[in-house]
Image (spheres, rainbow, N blue to C red):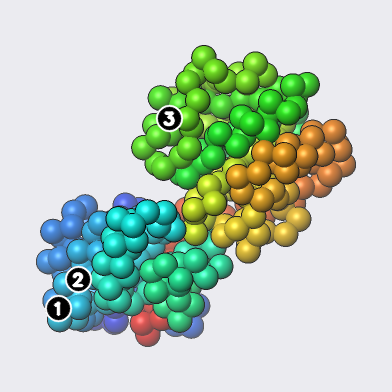
């Protein structure tokens, strides 16, 4: 492609986004990668630019406000982690965000059910598109599922409900459980609920070391027999999708939480428990732990799903296609 035939330019903080891209229907465009809000803003006066903001709610709100004030460049918000408000002050904040989000032209989600986002933030289906996510462990993927493992492993950081997992594991003293060291993982920085002191964890919980590298994540997942992803009820987005796909790619059986990011995009690839219900979660863990056929079938379905979602390059192509088709590249 030459510059003369490129019809659209994506401005994005996706660090590895391709310099040029095509959509299946013949659209084409180029990319400029930026690192700061100020750089995004400097490109917002040209309607030929599309500002594709990945996982930066603060930047998105600032750019959306400028769009409402007349900046013509369309805005695409990718993977916003938003929660249902629980207090009066949070509801006031949500009202302000709802008004600002009117300046966003398209929201890209890794889940399908936007009813919670619509109710709270006015982000409806008309301004939403579902794009399947990818595993971050693609380069480490095994050729076949890693069936063996010794723990029911609760993992991840965003909006995880460790308290419910611990309560469930206390009902299952015969099943060994595990988490990673929470301080090293920064669990409390991402809205997770983990209120127990470390000296009050259930006696069947082992704390694993994890240095946050992809290899370390692969290694801790490889030790799991089950990967348990309890998500807080307040979540209205796909808080566990990245961890789920990483665990699926290693061939582990996933126990997820009913709601966006699980029950709306998966079928037989995951087992589900309702949010914040220790007894229900314990029952699903017990079933998956003891039913070898169910656990293996679920793990295999997830393994195939994660492999079908492909690599980071495949994911970037899906983003480019969604943006190009929406804005007519």
Q: Quadrant location of residue 173?
A: top right
State the residue at coordinates (29%, 81%). Answer: 7
Horizontal and vertical percent for residue 74? 27, 77
Q: How many numbered discs, if any?
A: 3
**Is residue 25 visible in the rendered structure shown here?**
yes
Tell me the element at label 2.
helix
Q: CA distance from mark 3 to mark 2?
A: 34 Å
Q: Quadrant location of residue 10?
A: bottom left
Q: Quadrant location of residue 75?
A: bottom left
271 shown above or below 151: below
Residue sitting at the far front:
88
Query: In this view of the protein, which residue sits in the foreground, 89 or 193?
Result: 89
The reply to whether callout 3 and callout 2 are in contact (CB within 8 Å) is no
The reply to whether callout 1 and callout 2 are in contact (CB within 8 Å) is yes
Q: CA distance from mark 1 to mark 2?
A: 6 Å
Question: Which quadrant is the N terminus positioned in?
Answer: bottom left
Tell me the element at label 3.
helix
Question: Which quadrant is the C terminus positioned in?
Answer: bottom left
Within 10 Å of the Cα at label 2, are there few (<14), some (14-19), or many (20+) other Cα atoms? some
Q: Which residue is mark 3?
A: 185
Q: Which residue is mark 1?
A: 69
Q: Which residue is mark 2?
A: 65
């Amino acid at each position: 492609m030459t510059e003369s035939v490129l019809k659209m330019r994506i401005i994005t903080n996706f660090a590895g986004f391709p310099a040029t891209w095509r959509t299946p229907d013949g659209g084409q465009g180029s990319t400029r990668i930026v690192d700061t809000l100020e750089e995004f803003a400097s490109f917002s006066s040209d309607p030929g630019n599309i500002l594709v903001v990945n996982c930066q709610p603060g930047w998105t709100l600032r750019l959306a406000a400028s769009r409402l004030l007349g900046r013509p460049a369309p805005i695409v918000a990718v993977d916003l982690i938003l929660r249902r408000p629980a207090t009066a002050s949070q509801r006031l904040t949500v009202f302000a965000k709802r008004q600002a989000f009117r300046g966003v032209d398209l929201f890209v989600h890794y889940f399908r059910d936007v009813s919670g986002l619509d109710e709270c933030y006015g982000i409806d289906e008309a301004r939403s598109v579902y794009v399947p996510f990818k595993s971050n462990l693609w380069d480490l993927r095994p050729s076949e599922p890693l069936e063996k493992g010794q723990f029911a492993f609760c993992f991840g950081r965003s909006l995880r409900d460790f308290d419910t997992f611990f309560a469930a594991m206390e009902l299952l003293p015969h099943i060994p459980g595990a988490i990673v060291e929470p301080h090293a993982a920064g669990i409390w920085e991402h809205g997770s609920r983990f209120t127990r002191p470390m000296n009050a964890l259930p006696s069947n919980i082992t704390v694993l070391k994890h240095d946050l590298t992809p290899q370390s994540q692969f290694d801790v997942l490889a030790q799991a027999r089950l990967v348990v992803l309890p998500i807080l009820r307040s979540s209205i987005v796909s808080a566990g999708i990245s961890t789920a796909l990483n665990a699926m790619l290693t061939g582990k059986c996933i126990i997820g939480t009913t709601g966006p990011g699980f029950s709306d995009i998966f079928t037989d690839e995951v087992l589900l428990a309702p949010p914040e219900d220790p007894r229900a979660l314990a029952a699903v863990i017990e079933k998956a732990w003891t039913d070898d056929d169910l656990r293996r079938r679920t793990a295999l379905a997830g393994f195939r799903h994660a492999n079908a979602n492909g690599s980071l390059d495949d994911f970037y192509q899906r983003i480019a296609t969604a943006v190009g088709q929406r804005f007519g590249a």
